[in-house]
Amino acid sequence: MTIQENIQDFQRRLHGTNCQLIAVSKTHPVELIQEAYDGGQRAFGENKAQEMKDKQPQLPSDVEWHMIGHLQTNKVKYIAPFVRLIQSVDSLRLLQEINKQAQKHHRVIDCLLQFYIAEEETKFGLDLEEARQILRSEDFAVLNNVRICGVMGVATNTEDEQHLQREFARLRGYFEALQQEFFKDAPHFKEISMGMSSDYRLAIAEGSTMIRVGSAIFGHRDYSVTP
């Protein structure tokens, strides 16, 4: 199937759900992203700020750019003018830098708190108590140019569906706990970003509102030609 056909297939699968498709375009050239765009896709996920910055001016202005990879504070400035959602916030320090750069561009940047839910040491993220400490802090209270819209997590790379289900349920539980404690009257706090090409069906069943799908749309990446 072509990229456009893959996009349209996912649109059919997600019809009637409360779930948005984020096409993971990292390492793929702008020509392939344009193909997905022509198939109706608007939200794209990148994991490197410099790569996102380079691609953004080459594509239509209504593309929604999502940062889904680990973001270093010194790279926030590259994407602050245009990024739609930073899904990978894992520290107060990063939130403070996002706020600082958003202020410069007279923007409020939407963010998700990334939680560590996998049994893999290579993953990034907060635990629930760390997230609570951030949200309770006076330092967070003065950040007027960021808006926390939900949570994100990367599950373990495994084919064990029960294991994945537990991790997705755990992330949903974190979302519900924070919603109850900090965002009860905040309609913008609504996103649970979880699920990828291999496990998105399980994630949707556990309440995902955003799935991050790359290989099932673009095919497998050739990391030897990363831009």
Image (cartoon, helix red, strand yellow):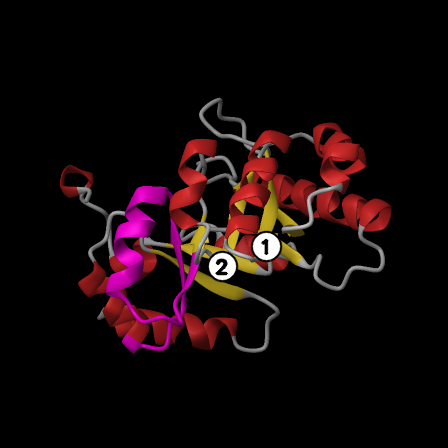
Q: Could you classify mark 1 by the number of other residues whose Cα lies within 10 Å: few (under 14), some (14-19), or many (20 or more)? A: some
Q: Does 53 appear above or below 118?
A: below
Separation (CA) of disc 2 from disc 1 = 7 Å
What kind of residue is marked 2? Arg
Q: Is residue 145 above or below residue 119?
A: below
Crowd around label 2: few <14 · some 14–19 · many ≥20 (10 Å):
some
The outermost residue toward the left is 225
Residue range (magenta): 38-65
Left or right position of 180 against 135: right
Could you tell me which quadrant the C terminus lies in? top left
Instruction: Tell me which amino acid carries mark 1.
Output: Asp
Residue 194 is at least partly visible in this image: no
- Circle 1 is placed at which residue position? 110
**Vertical side of 86 occupied by 12: above or below:** below
Residue 223 placement: quadrant? top left
Callout 2 secondary element: loop
The answer to whether the residues at label 2 and label 1 have Cβ atoms under 8 Å apart is yes
Q: How many discs mark residues in the rendered view?
A: 2
Viewed as shown, does residue 109 lie left or right of 83? right
Residue at the location (71% across, 34% down)? 131
The picture places residue 59, in percent across and down from the top left corner, at 28, 67
Is 97 within the magenta?
A: no
Q: Quadrant for residue 96, please give it.
A: top right
Q: Position of residue 73 (x, y in %)?
A: 47, 33
The label on residue 84 is 2
Q: Is residue 55 left or right of residue 126?
A: left
Question: Which residue is more in the foreground, 198 or 125?
Answer: 125
Across and down, in percent, residue 29 comes to 20, 56
